[in-house]
Amino acid sequence: MYVEKGCYGGKILFIDLDKEEGKRQPVGDSLALKYLGGDGFGAYLLNKFVNPKVDAFSPENAIIITPGLLTGTIFPTAGKVAFFAKSPVNEGWGEAVAGGRLGFMLKQAGYDAVIIKGKAKQLSYLVIKNDEVLVKPAEHLKGKSTRETQEIIRKDEGGHFKDFVVVSIGLGGENRVRFAGIDVEERQAARSGIGAVMGSKNLKAIAVYGDRDIKVADPEKMYRLFVEYYNKMLESPAFVADGKYGTAEFLEWMNSERGTFPTRNWREGVFDERKEIDPYYWAPRYVVKNKACIQCPKPCGKAFVIKDKYHGELDGVEYETLFALGSNCGVGNIEAVAKANELCDLYGIDTISTGGVIGFVMDLYENGVLSKEDIGIDARFGNEDALIELVEKIARREGIGDMMAEGVKRMAEKLGGNAADYAVHVRGLEPPAYDVRGIKGMALAFMTSPRGACHLRSGAYALELTGKFWKFEGVDRFSSKNKGREIAEMENFMAVYDALGVCKFSRGIFLLDFYDALEAAIGKGFTEEELLIIGERINNLKHIFNIKAGWTREHSKLPKKFRIPIPEGVSKGSYVSEEEEKEMLDDYFGARGWDKNGIPKKKKLEELEIEEFMRE
Amino acid sequence: MYVKAIPENCSGCMVCEAVCSMVHFNVVNRNKSGIRIEKKGVTEDIPHVCSQGNECDYECIKACKYDAIKIDENGVVYVIEEKCTGCRLCELACPLNAIHIHEKMAYKCDLCGGEPECVKYCSQNALVVVEG
């Protein structure tokens, strides 16, 4: 009854690429109330339908796509769509969340989840048009950029308005660059290498069109809430800051006030050459207009146009990318950083991992582990030509790019010697732009995130860096004490956002006050406590998948670089010691109700009603 | 009076579409919205909405074979549901892409009785009301 009268699409679509067919199954109330949608459905379905031991590139792996529960409704900033698969990056839990219109369109087509298994005989693209599912040949799209692929399919599939929402991989996914992502109409589902999984399935793109009503249980109430929150958002300081400068508004603060902006492959925590990569510099000069995700009145996307040498255009540049392709490679020329960003988007490779592996190679070069002959270019930090060329080489898997396309962890293993000392990753995933040597709680979050070094599963960076958020106050970022419960609770908090499909940049406005929104959306409200249990359930399910895939406590180790004190700035001298690492992880496992090896106790699984998943 | 779009300001958030279909039909369905955003690459998001004859020559009315499109006393171009067959002639004729067919019915902007909701909730000032 909640599914039927609420904002659910109502169906799960199973697609078998081998048989070229789609089957539908209704979504029941019990599944909806237990997992909500989005991240919750992903956590349930990946555990249910993918053996965690299969190779990530095996046809037995699945790509699961879920719109959030509120995605498709008018609720402000509810527009997210999530992708799940066994990840070729960490050989375990993989997920990537993006904005754009895909989630909304899946709801209009009547779907709360799409599960794609098997492997197409030849390079193909998938067409989902309401109940119709077609696998079409895509040989003509081979090697095409994400942008061009989407344009061609939109044109070919037609419609009065070229109304198909098309998401695609680029050369990166086709070449199975391990950190290839999926381009969702200029927004990226970048992390975890799900684009490479798409490539392994010979799937170049997915085109979706639906024309059905997305209804809600109480439209008047929903509209009232929309008006209330819309006005609240416009009154918030973030409306001006994000609207003008995007996600990197706090870049200068991260350098001068916190000293935690990772620089030159995590040598420093302050990037002295940051003037141009600060959006206060580039936004007035290069941004032609704002870009928003669906249902967001507070656009942090920017249409960035580069003329002259680096001619191009992109939606960006986001904070994480300004670090990855900027400070981490020592490049301060915003035009070069933006160009490298555009190339990553067009090739469909994750900017964070790409910048991570390029910074790694630059570090190896400056330390004499790799030579100019090995790399093919003078790869010193700050050489913008090397930055651009290495992006190209990774996507094409050319020369050293072939090894770089495997990511920092595998490249270090292949090189042997002391290369691993320079490799910055947790469980194979290159970290985002928070120098956690001076943000201890985030160091723990890098270890506990189900997908590897990630800032968004916990979102605890804001809490750690300002000292307060939600129920937490007086948090000391330099301390390793009492971080377990903090990170576990933040992970549960954030999983609710991903289950609902609400943007995490709204978390300061909504917190977990979704009772009325959910009552309006599906006819049943959820209290903060109820939502947090679902968030905890989701986090445990992802962890169970990792355990079954072979995860042990040893896998969550921090890189050696985090043991070296930050050399300068306001976080000077801070680092994460072996003891602190152990202390925080123990604390976290305790807070989660897991044993000292990180295995959930029976009691916890029963409490969360997910004991069946550990038994299998 | 009509709603005019300023595409240079449009962020492509599509709040206007959702507002329109919620206010008129209590659902979100862009196919039932009287305003629709065309997404064209990175730099172009173009809202299409009826100019009520101010920036066109009433091509829809001229094209309609069923006498299903009229102008009311306030100058608002409206569709008579009982007469519309969904033949698509108006859609093909409109130079502004501002009327379209969904399930055998033409949908277009009706100005919400004089206070267009979409204009109220365009955070980027990409929609304005033009008197006249």
Image (cartoon, coloured by chain):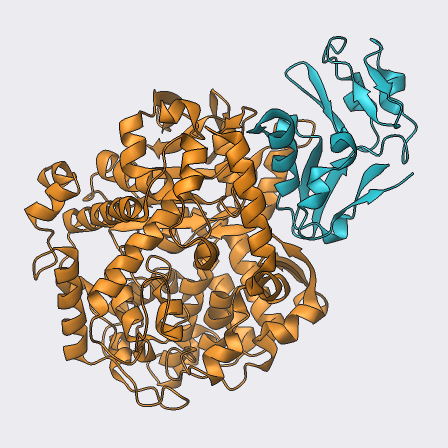
> Relative to residue B55, is residue A186 depicted above or below?
below
Q: Nearer the viewer, residue B60 or A221?
A: A221
Q: Horizontally, is A566 left or right of A284 in the view?
A: left
Q: Nearer the viewer, residue A515 or B103?
A: A515
Image chain in cyan: B
Q: Horizontally, is A301 left or right of B59 in the view?
A: left
Residue A379, can we see it? Answer: no
> Relative to residue B57, is residue A445 depicted above or below?
below
Residue A261, can we see it? Answer: yes
Question: Residue drawn at (59%, 33%), measured in percent from left and top?
Answer: A164
> What is the quadrant of the N terminus of chain A in the image?
top left
> What is the quadrant of the C terminus of chain A in the image?
top left
Where residue A142 sits: x, y (%)?
Answer: 52, 42
Q: Nearer the viewer, residue A422 or B48?
A: B48
Colour assigned to chain A in the rendering is orange
Q: Horizontally, is A286 left or right of B70 in the view?
A: left
